[in-house]
Image: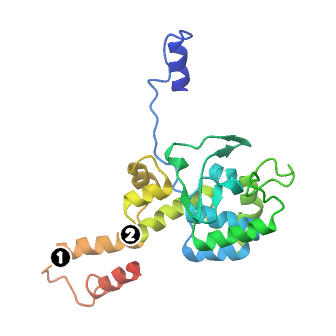
Amino acid sequence: MSALFSHAIRYEWAATNPISALRSSAKRLRIPDILTPEEFQALLLELSQRERVMVMLAGSTGLRRGELIALRWCNIDFELMQANVTHSVWHNVEGDTKTEASRKPVPLHPLVVEELRQWKLATLYHSDDDYLFPSIAKNGSQPIQPDMILKRHIRPALERIGVKKRIGWHSFRHGLATMLRQQGVDIKTAQELLRHTNSRITLEIYQQAVSAEKRVAQNLAFRGLLEGSSLQHPSSTLGGGMKEDVTSINH
């Protein structure tokens, strides 16, 4: 709205910008739920082929919802094992990606490449210009509705395996960022994989400290505070249990 009023002022259609004094916050109202590796694997086993491929793509690449459903077969490079993100779809309208950084190619895991090969053989729409996940009702002219996939397939599958988390498409993107942190991937590489404009977005918005990491960090700090104190005990978690915690995270 601010940009709209600024445009109006530029063409002398308005004298002031009433939005300029408005304060807004970029703070998330709610951190998205994410799946554990065990929950993610169990979900894949509950899904049919189309939904399984969609979840594997979203979980391994961090593609945004609109980017995922905008993919056409010409965007998939099986030889280079990458997806070329060129467009995004919102409410059945195909447009540009969110940012210029979003247009960078996305690497594909060999397992995902094989799933895509199998899906291309199974789908009725496998020409270069066809969507990977087309709407059958629209005879392939539009991509499938991603919210419908969530409501009718993914969330019921999660209920069947006993997962009560509120999972959306962005949960898979957020989960990838968290897993990158867990595995010790440097922030610059994570930024490139998630295709953020800058690393601050990656660090502040998409990555959250895993509770186990917090516990180890707290133990290390508190151990330092108590070093040499009579309060320390060899059998306490500040001593022997520390190495076990660190080892479990590293593996």
Number of numbered labels in the structure image? 2
Nearer-the-camera pick, 20 or 92: 92
Amino acid type at circle 1 is Leu
Nearer-the-camera pick, 118 or 149: 118
Position of the N terminus by quadrant? top right
Left or right? Give the position of 174 relative to 136.
Answer: left
Nearer-the-camera pick, 229 or 15: 15
Is 16 placed above or below 217 here? above
Instruction: Provide the residue designation for mark 2.
Output: 184
In this rendering, does residue 168 appear at all?
no
Q: Hey, which quadrant is residue 79 in on the image?
A: bottom right
Left or right? Give the position of 31 relative to 132.
Answer: left
Q: Residue at x 74, y 59 (%)?
A: 149
Which mark lies nearer to you, 1 or 2? 2
Is 5 placed above or below 182 here? above
Nearer-the-camera pick, 32 or 206: 206
Where is residue 20? Give x, y as percent: 45, 23
Is 135 placed above or below 24 here? below
Secondary structure of the residue carrying numbered label 1: loop
Where is residue 130? Give x, y as percent: 77, 53
User: Gap in Å between the C-alphas at discs 1 and 2?
Assistant: 28 Å
Left or right? Give the position of 37 relative to 147.
Answer: left
In this rendering, does residue 227 appear at all?
yes
Amino acid type at circle 2 is Gly
Outermost residue, left direction?
A: 228
Secondary structure of the residue carrying numbered label 2: loop
- Mark 1 and mark 2 lie on one chain; the one further toward the N terminus is 2
Q: Are marks 1 and 2 in contact (CB under 8 Å)?
A: no
Where is residue 14? Give x, y as percent: 54, 11
Instruction: Provide the residue designation for mark 1.
Output: 226
Q: Residue at x 65, y 55 (%)?
A: 75
